[in-house]
Amino acid sequence: MISSKVATALDNHSWIRTMFQEGKRLKMQFEEKEIFDFSIGNPALNPPKDFYDAMNQVIESPVKGKHGYGDYQGIFAARQKIAFYLQERFSVDFTPNHIVMTVGAAGAMNVVLKSILNEQDEVIVLSPYFLEYEGYIQNFNGKIVPVSLNNDFSINFESIKQALSKTTKAIILNSPHNPTGIIHTQQELNELGKLLDDYEHTFNQPIYVIYDTPYEQLIFDSVYSNPFSAYKHIIFIGSFSKELGISGERIGYIALSSDTPNKETLTSALVYCNRILGFIHAPMLMQRIIGEMVTLKIDPRPYKVRRDLIVSILREAGFEFIDPQGGFFVFPKAPIEDDIEFCVEAAKKFKVLTVPGSQFGRRGYFRLSYSVPLEQIQNSKEVFHAIYKHFSN
C-alpha cells in the first residue's frame, strides 16, 4: 500500500520526535516543572522587536497582491537584504540575482540536492550528522556516504580522501554542528578546500560543498569561519528559524557568491527545483518581513548564557563532552555503552528527555538541546547528578 522505501523509513523511527511526543505525554500526567525536556531544537526566545515592527509594517501596508503568488526565486527586497548581510559577514560579493528564498533550510537542502544529483551520485556527510540528511539524499536517488569525524569532532581528512570517488557530487558541511555544537575552523575549511581542488584536477569534475548553517549567528567563543575564502564551489544554506525564533514560519535561503563557477546555470536550476518540488516559493509574508527588517543581525548572548549553565551542570555531574562553540546542542558521552537504553531509562525514571547518539550515527552519546527556559536548566542540576550516579553504580 505504501512505498517500500518509506515503509523502511517508518520502521527506523525518529528518536527526536519520539522523545518530543513522550514529553507531551508526561506533561499531561505531571507538572511541567517536574519534566526536563531537552529533546528538540525549538528556539527558546521570541523574535526580536525589529521582526515585529517589520511584520506590523507589512500587514498594514496596502500592497496589491500581498498574499498572492510571487517570484519563484523570492522577492527582490528579501534577497537584497540577505545579499547585504552575507557580503558584510564574509567580505565576499553577493547579489540578489544568485540568492533563492526557500521553505526553511530543510526545503533549501532538498532543492539543492534535486538540482545537482544524478542517480547514485554520492554525497559525503560527516558523522555524527543530522539524520534527515539521509532521507533528503535518498529523495533524489543519491547515495549517502558517512565519514566519521575525529573523537574531538574535527574533520578526518584521511577518511574523506578514502571516501572520494568518481561519483562524489557533494559534501555536506554543517557548522555550527548539530548535534555536537562544534564549529569547523578556518584551517579545517582551508585544508578541505585544497583537498577538493586536488580532486577536481584529478577527476576533472568539481565537488560542491553544501554549507548548511541554520545556526550561523549563534557563535559564542570562536571567530566564525569563512567557507568562501576556502573553496569556490560553495552552496550556502541559511535559515531564520533559529536565529530569529521563527522555526514554524519556514523561511530560509540558498546563496551563491559572485565568484561561484557556473552560478547562472546553478541558480536557474535552484529556482526551477524550488517550483517543481511543490514549494512554489517561500512564504510571501515572511519574505516581505525579512525585506523590511532593519537588520538581520541578532544577539547570541542569551544562548551563550544557557550554554554556559548546562555545561557547568553536566561537567559537575560527571559527564564528558566537547564544549559546544555555537548552536544550541551539547553531545555528551552516555555513562553506559547503550545510548538508547540510557535515554529511555532517563526518561522513564527521571523524566529527562534527550536523544540517543545513535540517531545521529554515533553510538554511546546523547544529545541535549539547551534552547529551553533558563529555569529548566537551573532546576536540572540535581536530576543530572542523580542520573549520572544511577548509571555509574
Image (cartoon, helix red, strand yellow):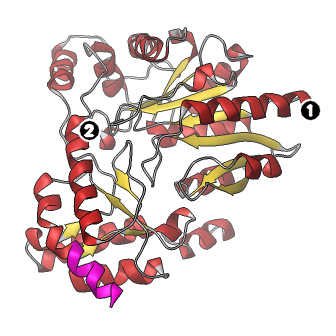
Q: Mark 2 and mark 1 in contact? Answer it, CB < 8 Å.
A: no
Asked if the magenta segment contains residue 297, the reply would be no
Q: Amino acid at mark 1?
A: Thr
Query: Which quarter of the picture shows residue 257?
Result: top right
Q: Split into 4 quadrants, where in the image is the C terminus?
A: bottom left
Could you tell me which secondary element the residue under label 2 belongs to?
loop
Number of disc labels = 2
- Residue 163 pos. (x, y %): 79, 51
Q: Can you give x and y, in whole percent of width and height, for residue 18 in the image? A: 38, 71
**Residue 43 is at least partly visible in this image:** yes
- 300 relative to 193 in the view: left or right: left
Residue 321 falls in image quadrant:
bottom left
Q: Position of residue 307 (x, y in %)?
A: 27, 49
**Eyeballing the image, is 343 above or below 183?**
below
Of the residues shown, which amino acid type is indicated by label 2? Gly
For label 1, count other residues whose C-alpha is less than 10 Å away and answer few (under 14), some (14-19) or many (20+): few
Q: CA distance from mark 2 to mark 1?
A: 44 Å
| Residue 142 in sight here | no
Disc ID at residue 245: 2
Which element is circle 1 on?
Answer: helix
Q: Residues within 10 Å of mark 2 (few under 14, many from 20)?
A: some
Highlighted magenta segment, given as a residue range: 384-393
Q: Residue at x 19, y 41 (%)?
A: 45
